[in-house]
Image: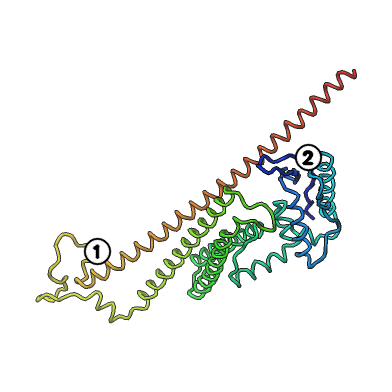
Amino acid sequence: MIAGPEISVLNTSISSTPKPYTIYHITLRLPLRTFTLEKRYSDFITLHGALTSQANGASPPVSPPPKSYFTSTTSSPALAESRRQALEKYLQTINTDPDDRWRNTPAWRSFLNLPSSSSSNGRHVKDLRSAHNTGQPITDPVAWLDHHRHLKTTLHSARLELTKRDQASSAQSQHECSAQAKKCLVQAGQIISNLDKGLKTLGTDAWGTEKLGDGEMRRRVDLVESAKKEKEGLENLLNAMVAQSSLDATIASASPASKEKLLSVTASSDGHRKPATGRVLGKETDRTRALDNQGVLQLQKQLMQEQDADVDVLAAAVRRQRVIAGEINEELEVQKNLLGLLDEDVDRVQGKIDVAKKRIGKIS
């Protein structure tokens, strides 16, 4: 079981807006990182209502502190501190309660910017399939990331099927791999459409929490565009493979009469076969020397089709490399941020060690 985050409301501050309000700073410590959220009292009230609604009407084990109508937290530090402690207890009680139905709701994860919990993976798979079939936009920020991960898995499955098709030796195996790849690509197209529709509503408040920032919105738009390009590349690759197979099958099944017509030549008066008239001498090749004008034209069309297919395959490979490079860049950014957080933790621990050494020095 994955350990939950450590939640605490360490302090408060007053906003600098024309109408000031109290901001509560929520600190979450995860196994790999620590971050802080800023929430208003009204956000907690909205969260409480959303948790009750999404838990089939069951209220959380504790309620947030009541609203004060005669005193403001901006003018009363004592009230602000009392409310801070009550809100901290509210979050910690839900976080540690044996009943995890409130922690598994989208409202809780969205409020704390948490990823999906492992205990609800089975339900998320059903939700993903249901959303794909209904074509509904994904408007929950956390569920949106779950669907994107499923999209990447689907595209990867399509790529594997195309690889298996390229290695298949029988026509039946090639057809089955093509059908599976096409199925994955159709499903990927539906997921991309749902994600794209969801981005149009993710900019608004969800479950009463703050909307996604501009940077995060741009990142998600780039993820959708990258997935579109990868899907398009895989479709082009599949079409090129199917066209090449059809061409090979046509050539292999050609009748002797068709081949004779393709390779038809005119006979000279001495009985020797020679190319048709109108050809330029000295520029023939082994492949065109025995063909007439119609045969050369057919050969040229065939070569152009093969070149077009090769160009499509090359373009798809280039697009795949571009997508891979983008994913590597994203992973490097995440690792960079993790190293920065680790460096901060090391500095903090080193500071504590220095203070401890000084105290030991005074004692000795």
Across and down, in percent, residue 291 comes to 22, 70
Quarter of the rendering occupied by the N terminus: bottom right
Name the one closer to the observer, 153 or 37. Answer: 37
| Residue hosting label 1 | 286
In this rendering, would 334 be left or right of 10? Answer: left
Query: What residue is shown at x 61% (from left), y 56% (from top)?
Result: 204
In this rendering, would 254 be left or right of 329? Answer: left
Q: Tell me the SS state at disc 1.
A: loop
Query: What residue is shown at x 46% (from left), y 66% (from top)?
Result: 238
Looking at this view, name the residue that lies furthest to the right. 363
Vertical order, 38 against 56 (above or below): above
Quarter of the rendering occupied by the C terminus: top right
Q: What residue type is labelled 2?
A: Ser
Q: What residue type is labelled 1?
A: Asp
Name the one closer to the observer, 157 or 211. Answer: 211
Q: Whole-Å distance between the Cαs marked 1 and 2? A: 96 Å
Name the one closer to the observer, 171 or 13. Answer: 13
| Residue hosting label 2 | 75
Which dot, 1 or 2, sits closer to the camera? 2
Vertical order, 236 against 362 (above or below): below
What crowding class fits label 1: few (fewer than 14 Cα within 10 Å), some (14-19), or many (20 or more)? few
Query: What residue is shown at x 77% (from left), y 32% (from top)?
Result: 349
Vertical order, 262 against 237 (above or below): below
In this rendering, would 106 be left or right of 353? Answer: left
- Where is residue 338, by image quadrant? top right
Across and down, in percent, residue 267 comes to 14, 76
